[in-house]
Each structure stands twice: as C-alpha cells, then as structure tokens.
Image (cartoon, rainbow, N blue to C red):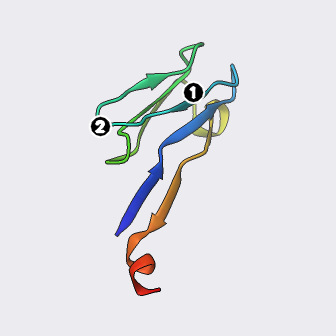
C-alpha cells in the first residue's frame, strides 16, 4: 500500500509551491491556475490547461509494504 508523505505541486505559471496538509484542505496557487487537495489521505489536482503546462509534481509517496519488509 502506498503512503503519502507530502502532497504538493509547483505552479509553472506563478511559481507558487502549494501543499495540502489535511483532508479536504484544497489549496490554490496565487494565479488560480492549479490546486492541490487531499492532505495525506488522497491526491487530487485541479488545473486550467494540462498537467504538462500547469504544474510540476512535488509529492512524496512511499510503498508502505516495502518499508515493513526492511
């Protein structure tokens, strides 16, 4: 099972780094181009044009099963 350590993106339009820290914590960059939601429970993105144009993924996710094996 995957575990979300950090749920964040960088907007390619305005440069804002935005992070959702709790469930239903929707955060939008200052130019309104993209948003991040879900905290460490789920990852949800909203964007204006396309993933490639609007944001860079900065989230950190680990495979919790592999962590238990070591």
Residue 33 vs residue 37: left or right?
right
Secondary structure beneath disc 2? loop
Please tell me whether residue 41 is drawn above or below residue 66 in the rendered image: above
Residue, far top: 31
Q: How crowded is mark 2: few (under 14 residues within 10 Å), some or many (20 or more)?
A: few
x, y percent for residue 53: 66, 33
Q: How many marks?
A: 2
What's the residue at 55%, 20% (across, down)? Answer: 29
Residue on which the image places disc 2: 23
What's the residue at 29%, 37% (across, down)? Answer: 23
Q: Which of marks 1 and 2 is in front?
A: 2
Query: Tags 1 and 2 in contact by the CB under 8 Å rule?
Result: no
Task: In the rendered structure, find residue 39 and report the number of the disc placed on it.
Answer: none
Q: Earlier in the sequence, mark 1 or mark 2?
A: 2
Marks 1 and 2 sit apart, C-alpha to C-alpha, by 25 Å
Residue 34 vs residue 21: left or right?
right
Please tell me whether residue 1 is drawn above or below residue 33 in the rendered image: below
Instruction: State the residue in front, 65 or 35.
Output: 65
x, y percent for residue 30: 58, 14
What's the residue at 34%, 70% (across, down)? Answer: 1
What's the residue at 64%, 24% (across, down)? Answer: 16
Q: Residues within 10 Å of mark 1 (few under 14, many from 20)?
A: few
Secondary structure beneath disc 1? loop
Instruction: State the residue in front, 10 or 53.
Output: 10
Residue on which the image places disc 1: 49
x, y percent for residue 11: 63, 28
């Amino acid at each position: 099972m995957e575990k979300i350590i950090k749920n964040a993106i960088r907007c390619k339009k305005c440069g804002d780094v935005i992070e959702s820290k709790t469930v239903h914590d929707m955060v939008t960059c200052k130019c309104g181009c993209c948003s991040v939601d879900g905290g460490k429970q789920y990852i949800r993105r909203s964007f204006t044009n396309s993933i490639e144009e609007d944001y860079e993924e900065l989230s950190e996710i680990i495979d919790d099963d592999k962590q238990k094996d070591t």
